């Protein structure tokens, strides 16, 4: 595990190889927003916020496009994005109790990598 240190805004951060983990206090509630992530990328990479947002959008679009084609995306140390198939099944309407048919669907999945799992422990 990496060492703990203080970063800006009183958040604690630790590094684990190339992975940087930011822990916000539980009292603040909620996670990191896209805008906060763009700010962090811009600061860490010493680039403009606009360039950081374009980079983030490019990564998310690349993951989305690969999943649309049914391909996996593996980021070593972070995790793997994949597509899973959910079989058709019967469900119940909660208001009436009537049986309804739920269609089969493809859903995105994420499996955390070892470094991410270890960092979160």
Image (cartoon, rainbow, N blue to C red):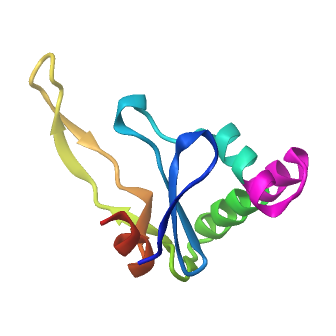
Counting every numbered tag in the picture gives: 0
Q: Which residue is drawn at 89% across and 56% down?
A: 47
In x, y percent, where is residue 13? Answer: 52, 58
- Name of the residue lying farthest toward the top: 95
Looking at the picture, tell me which residue is in the foreground, 107 or 62: 62
Q: At which x and y percent is residue 52?
A: 82, 53
- Per the picture, the main secondary structure of the magenta-coloured stretch is helix
Q: Is residue 8 above or below residue 62?
A: above
Locate the C terminus and report the quarter of the image it occupies.
bottom left
Tell me the quadrant of the picture where the N terminus can be found: bottom left
- Above/below status of 105 relative to 2: above
Q: Give the range drawn in magenta.
A: 41-57
Which one is in front, 34 or 66? 34
In the image: residue 69, left or right of residue 89:
right
Q: Where in the figure is residue 74, as x and y percent of width and height?
A: 55, 79
Q: Give coordinates of residue 5: x percent, y percent.
A: 52, 60
Residue projecting furthest to the left: 97
Residue 109 magenta-drawn?
A: no
On the rendered structure, is 115 left or right of 11?
left
Please tell me which residue is depicted at 81% across the width and 59% down the height of the picture: 55
- Image height of 93 relative to 22, above or below: above
* Residue 49 is a magenta residue: yes
Q: Which residue is drawn at 80% across and 52% down?
A: 42
102 or 62: nearer the viewer? 62
In terms of image quadrants, where is residue 104? bottom left
* Residue at image point 72% right, 62% down: 59
């Amino acid at each position: 595990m990496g060492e703990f240190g203080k970063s800006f805004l009183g958040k604690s951060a630790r590094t684990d190889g190339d992975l940087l983990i930011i822990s916000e206090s539980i009292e603040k509630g909620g996670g990191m927003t896209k805008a906060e992530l763009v700010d962090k990328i811009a600061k860490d990479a010493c680039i403009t916020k606009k360039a950081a947002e374009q980079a983030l959008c490019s990564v998310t679009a690349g993951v989305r496009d690969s999943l649309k084609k049914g391909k996996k995306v593996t980021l070593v140390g972070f995790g793997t994005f994949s597509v899973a198939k959910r079989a058709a099944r019967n469900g119940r309407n909660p208001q009436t109790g009537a049986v309804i048919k739920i269609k089969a669907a493809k859903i995105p999945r994420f499996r955390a990598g070892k470094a991410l799992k270890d960092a979160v422990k």
